[in-house]
Amino acid sequence: MARHPRVVACTVATLLLCTISATVLVSDVGVSFGSSIPVLSGVQPLENASDPRSTFTIGLALTPTSIDLSSSSLAFNWWATACGPTSDTSTSTSTTAQSASTGAAELVVPGLQNVTCGRLYESFSVSVDFNPVYMWNASETVSHANGSSTIQGTGLSFTPQETFDTTHNFTWISTRQSLAQRRQHSVSAWYPFDRYTVSTTVEAFDLGSSDALPVEFVHLYAGLSGYELRVDSLDKVKTAQSDEALYIAFSIRRCKGVKLFAVTLFLTNYILAAAMVWVAVCAYYGPPLPSETALFLPLANILLLPQLRAAMPGVPDFGIFMDLFGYYVNIVAVRMRA
């Protein structure tokens, strides 16, 4: 080992990088990321969701389908379901309770005590940002008599309820202004540590009585590669149509793997620039270089540095703080050494 210190150093560095990659993977997605889990596991009921004036409540599960930073938009796919107390006369206390009117199986949601969802015999509508986007009419429900969702011999199946899609623009108005917004009028200037905010207002109504319905839960059960989407706040608000509206605020961040990769490429630019400065200094004042071809390295790195920046995942246009503090300095230093 003493005769080959470089081999030992490279081996140790490789093992260290593998350890860092494994740590990022575990911290980002967990150890058992391949196991199957119920979609509605981890549901947290909202405070004061139950309203004695309403016969049932609404549960919302959603997943992001696309995040487009260039157009400042976020798209969701929602699943809305009617929920009610288990002790209701129209439901059964068993996990697979059968509806007397439609024969449809209800769903017991983990985390919700004495509440069952998937009640197909309740009619309701959902409005997002004051626009009606979804309506469930119980009179138009099709279900098999034995409670199965598939009609034998036809191959047709019916899901408990359909889903609907919505698109939301980022929220830019804030009581506090960041340095990036003031100096560059762009939140993306902090890449890869940029953070975006999306807010929306959800209302639910009973189709029979037109009364406002409270929201029992809002469950974000999936994400998108490269981003970390969170529900920051759930606030009950009043609108002109409803006293049970729900204001939801989301935040979008880069995931840990994207941050690590971008920072690694950023530091690589500095290392290459420093190496080119060392080559230039050695060419004039230092010991002779091992090969004259080393003098062409600065010229090659002038073309390499832009490629490294372009390899950063989801990188914005030129002008971010990472360019001001790194790329511009590195490209000028390599150009001067060349």
Image (cartoon, rainbow, N blue to C red):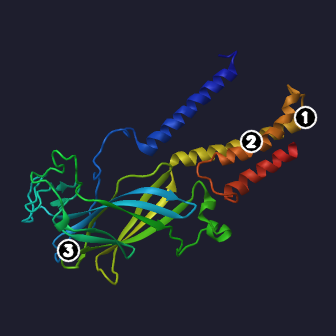
Q: State the residue in front, 240 or 186.
A: 240
Can you give x and y, in whole percent of width and height, for residue 292 in the image?
A: 88, 28
The three-letter code of the residue at mark 3 reads: Asp
What is the quadrant of the C terminus in the image? Answer: top right
Instruction: Locate residue 337, reporting x and y percent.
Output: 86, 43
Q: Amino acid at mark 2?
A: Leu
Whole-number angstrom distance, CA of label 1 to CA of label 2: 21 Å
- Which residue is more in the foreground, 46 or 84? 84
Q: Secondary structure at mark 3?
A: loop
> In front: mark 1 or mark 2?
2
Occupied quadrant, residue 320: bottom right
Question: Dot 2: within a 10 Å radius of its alpha carbon, few (fewer than 14), some, or many (20 or more) residues?
Answer: some
Q: Earlier in the sequence, mark 1 or mark 3?
A: 3
Between the residue at mark 3 and the residue at mark 2, the CA separation in whole angstroms equals 63 Å
First in sequence: mark 1 vs mark 2: 1
Q: Quadrant of residue 177?
A: bottom right
**Residue sticking out furthest to the right:** 284
**Mark 1 or mark 3: which is in front?**
3
Q: Is residue 285 visible?
A: no
Instruction: Identify the secondary structure beneath mark 1.
Output: helix
Q: Which residue is mark 2?
A: 304
Determine whether 253 is above or below 204 in the image. Answer: above
Amino acid under label 1?
Ala
Q: Earlier in the sequence, mark 3 or mark 2?
A: 3
Residue at 86% in and 29% down? 293
Cα separation between marks 1 and 3: 80 Å
Whether residue 78 is visible here, answered yes or no, is: yes
